[in-house]
């Protein structure tokens, strides 16, 4: 059991070492492709070389990252931004505070991706990584044993990232690349380029031909030619080389098949989402047509009601005008009444005035007064008093 556990530990340590080496190698390739791409165009969020580099760097900084202990003793997942925020807090004129206060970026992983973009635009990514690696105490507190940032590969990483300072990056910090819900996926397809010379191809064919001929000679005892003697070590080495090449081709085949399967799954998901969107568009068109018809019907009803109200207003105006034109006496009486009422309101109503007005208003009394005034029998009291020879009795 002890030997089995020891072998398992050796295998795990060997696998961890291979993983670290592969990540560093792929990071070197991605930096080289970025530099080559920058010679022809500006690098932005749409460049596949940058997306692959960002995924590789995120995988490196997240390699064997410790989880955060909760009150109940469980470990919750943690992002590399938590380490960068603490380790790079003392860097002068850093962008840590501005990224921490960004409103449109909420998750920790999204803030880490925003930090990568801002550091590349500032041409200080290598400076940030170097400052973080110098704080060994903080690095040791955030990472487990066997992590890339704790090994010798970390110094190589800082040196590789120094070449990115010659590239002018242009990023938008509000795009889909900052979405923290999607994991960082590395695309190894651009790096699966093998250049085999004609000599290596001929040597492989010669090895296979030699193996086949040796098998045929051993199976035919009637061959009378001179014996073909070869060293066992050379045969063993040739078989090992062929086996390694076969396994490498088999692993590449498996990777490509898995990549094709993932692309097929993504394609089927995109097709289903497209169908759902088309159905939603159709439903929205139907609802829009129904609402349009309802609004048109409402507009027609309102226009009819407005016409009816206008016709009723014209009829009422015509009726009032005809009533005024056919009853002038009534209108005059009404005007007289209004005038008399205004006069009566203006005058003071006393008994003497009322009696005087009543006597003057009657036509008969007016005629009697006129007849009395014109009669010769009547004389004014002043003439009687002043005429000579007349004395009052």
Image (cartoon, helix red, strand yellow):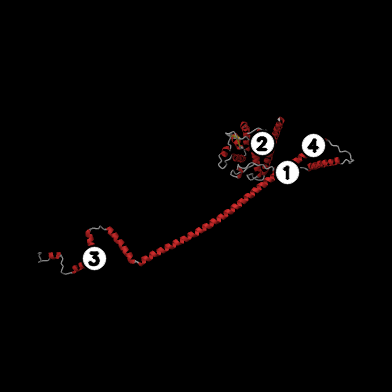
- Give the residue number, with chain letter if any, for mark 4: 237
Q: Which quadrant of the figure has residue 253?
A: top right
User: Is tag 1's residue or tag 2's residue first in the polypeptide sequence?
Assistant: 2
Looking at the picture, does residue 249 appear above or below residue 300?
A: above
Q: Nearer the viewer, mark 2 or mark 4?
A: 4
Q: Cβ–Cβ below 8 Å for labels 2 and 3?
A: no
Residue 236 seen by the camera: yes
Secondary-structure class at tag 4: helix
Of labels 1 and 2, the one closer to you? 1
**Secondary structure of residue under mark 2:** helix
Measure the alpha-carbon separation of dots 3 and 1: 133 Å
Q: Residue at x 57, y 55 (%)?
A: 286
- Checking the image for residue 157, the label placed there is 2
- The residue that label 1 is drawn on is 253
Q: CA distance from mark 2 to mark 3?
A: 129 Å
User: What is the x, y in percent for residue 199?
Assistant: 79, 42
State which tag comes first along the sequence, 2 or 3: 2
Measured Cα–Cα span from mark 1 to mark 4: 24 Å
Label 4 to label 3, Cα distance in Å?
156 Å
Kindly report which numbered mark, 2 or 3, lies closer to the viewer in this rendering.
3
């Amino acid at each position: 059991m002890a030997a089995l556990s020891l072998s398992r530990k050796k295998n795990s340590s060997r696998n961890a070492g291979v993983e670290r080496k592969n990540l560093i190698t792929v990071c070197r390739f991605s930096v080289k492709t970025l530099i080559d791409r920058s010679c022809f165009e500006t690098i932005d969020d749409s460049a596949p070389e940058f997306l692959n580099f960002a995924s590789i760097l995120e995988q490196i900084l997240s390699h064997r990252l410790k989880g955060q202990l909760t009150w109940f003793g469980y470990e919750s997942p943690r992002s590399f931004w938590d380490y960068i925020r603490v380790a790079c807090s003392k860097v002068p004129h850093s962008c840590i505070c501005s990224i921490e206060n960004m409103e449109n970026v909420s998750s920790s992983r999204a803030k880490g991706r925003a930090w990568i973009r801002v550091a590349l635009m500032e041409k200080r990514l290598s400076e940030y990584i170097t400052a973080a690696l110098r704080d060994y105490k903080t690095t040791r507190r955030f990472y487990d044993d066997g992590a890339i940032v704790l090994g010798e590969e970390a110094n190589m990483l800082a040196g590789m990232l120094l070449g990115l300072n010659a590239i002018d990056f242009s990023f938008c910090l509000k795009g889909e690349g900052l979405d923290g819900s999607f994991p960082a996926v590395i695309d190894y397809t651009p790096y699966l380029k093998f250049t085999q010379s004609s000599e290596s191809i001929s040597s492989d064919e010669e090895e296979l031909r030699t193996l086949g001929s040796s098998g045929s000679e051993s199976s035919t005892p009637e061959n009378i030619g001179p014996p073909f003697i070869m060293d066992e070590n050379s045969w063993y080495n040739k078989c090992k080389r062929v086996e390694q090449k076969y396994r490498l081709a088999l692993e590449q085949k498996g990777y490509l098949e898995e990549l094709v399967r993932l692309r097929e799954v993504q394609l089927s998901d995109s097709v289903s989402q497209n169908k759902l969107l088309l159905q939603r568009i159709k439903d929205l068109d139907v609802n829009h047509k129904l609402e349009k018809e309802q609004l048109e019907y409402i507009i027609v009803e309102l226009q009819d009601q407005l016409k009816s109200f206008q016709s009723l207003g014209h009829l009422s105006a015509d009726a009032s005008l005809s009533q005024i034109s056919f009853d002038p006496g009534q209108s005059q009486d009404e005007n007289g009444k209004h005038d008399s009422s205004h006069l009566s309101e203006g005058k003071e109503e006393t008994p003497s005035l009322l009696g005087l007005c009543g006597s003057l208003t009657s036509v008969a009394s007016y005629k009697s007064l006129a007849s009395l005034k014109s009669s010769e029998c009547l004389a004014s009291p002043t003439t009687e008093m002043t005429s000579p020879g007349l004395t009052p009795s």
